[in-house]
Image (tube, rainbow, N blue to C red):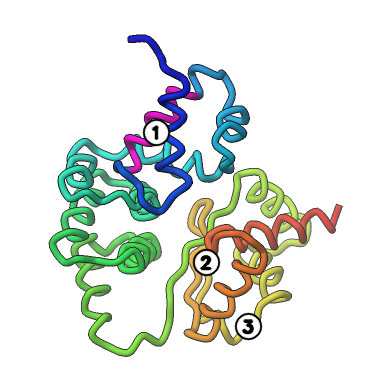
């Protein structure tokens, strides 16, 4: 089939630049891959659509979701890329399917999905069903804290690891020290690094403060720690 550049760009643009998306994230991700194949560069794709490489990555990562999950998103007309991308963070396909079913069965919000995944990652021995139950039950209570996952790029993680070895500190302690220079320590109720993700439990005040900081810095909350740690490490060179 002949590739129609203008048509593909127009359909992709609607789904990456407006809130009124017309298709699930994985279908838009496939469109982005076709554009990449056509142009031969992710940078060109980003320039054509005026979107960041990070946004492109979020859409294209959803292509890896299991067929059962994709069908659920299609059948329920769920076009939220943030929710779909977060579900890719779960390791087991069975967990991705279970959480997606619960998403629609219990009318879970984006925050519910985020909290479920964060709890599951922080407590790997807990089943996804238990994690879902815990989050849904917590909605009946007064929320006093938030679990947030912040991503580190691989280059930043490697630089952080080298600096920690040089200073004879643990990876967690160095990251926490750097962030504590910017954030009120009382906000942080628990902290840990799991793979390339920082999992932090924040007080209500801390969560609101970091949301404001992210908006002021023009980044998503999940990228806030990456910016702070990367800039701090650059200052040590």
157 in the magenta segment: no
Q: Residue 192 got which mark? A: 2
Say which label, 3 or 2, has the lower sequence index: 3
Count residues near mark 1 (Cα–Cα under 10 Å), then give few for <14, some for 14-19, many for 20+.
Answer: some
Q: What SS does tag 3 mark?
A: helix
Instruction: Name the residue: 56% across, 18% down.
Output: 40
Indicate left or right for 181 with 128 as reference.
right
- The number of numbered discs placed on residues in the rendered structure image is 3
- Asked whether 124 or 91 is in front, the reply is 91
Q: What SS does tag 2 mark?
A: strand
Count residues near mark 3 (Cα–Cα under 10 Å), then give few for <14, some for 14-19, many for 20+.
Answer: some
Residue 89 location, x and y as percent? 38, 50
Q: Quadrant of residue 60?
A: top left
Say which label, 1 or 3, has the lower sequence index: 1
Q: Magenta region's main secondary structure? A: helix
Query: What residue is shown with label 1?
Result: 11
Instruction: Name the residue: 55% across, 81% down.
Output: 206
Instruction: Name the residue: 21% across, 79% down.
Output: 137
Q: Quadrant of residue 220?
A: bottom right
Q: Does 106 appear above or below 71? A: below
Q: CA distance from mark 3 to mark 2?
A: 14 Å
- Is the Cβ of the residue at disc 1 closer than 8 Å to that at disc 3? no
| Residue most extreme to the top | 1
Indicate left or right for 105 with 165 as reference.
left
């Amino acid at each position: 089939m002949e590739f129609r550049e203008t048509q593909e760009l127009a359909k992709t643009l609607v789904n990456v630049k407006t809130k009124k998306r017309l298709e699930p994230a994985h279908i838009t991700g496939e469109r982005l891959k076709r554009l990449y194949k056509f142009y031969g560069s992710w940078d060109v794709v980003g320039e054509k659509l005026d979107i960041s490489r990070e946004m492109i990555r979020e859409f294209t990562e959803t292509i890896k979701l299991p067929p059962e999950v994709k069908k659920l998103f299609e059948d329920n007309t769920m076009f939220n890329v943030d929710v779909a991308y977060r579900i890719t963070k779960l390791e087991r396909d069975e967990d991705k399917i279970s959480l997606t079913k619960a998403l629609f069965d219990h009318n879970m919000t984006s925050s519910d999905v985020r909290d479920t995944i964060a709890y599951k990652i922080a407590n790997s021995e807990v089943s996804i069903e238990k994690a879902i139950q815990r989050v849904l039950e917590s909605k009946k209570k007064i929320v006093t804290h938030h679990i947030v996952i912040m991503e580190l790029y691989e280059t930043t993680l490697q630089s952080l690891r080298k600096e920690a070895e040089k200073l004879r500190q643990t990876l967690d302690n160095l990251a926490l020290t750097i962030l504590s220079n910017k954030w009120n320590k009382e906000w942080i109720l628990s902290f840990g690094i799991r793979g390339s993700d920082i999992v932090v439990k924040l007080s209500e005040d801390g969560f609101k403060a970091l949301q404001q900081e992210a908006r002021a810095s023009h980044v998503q909350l999940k990228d806030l720690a990456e910016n702070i740690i990367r800039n701090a490490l650059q200052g040590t060179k």
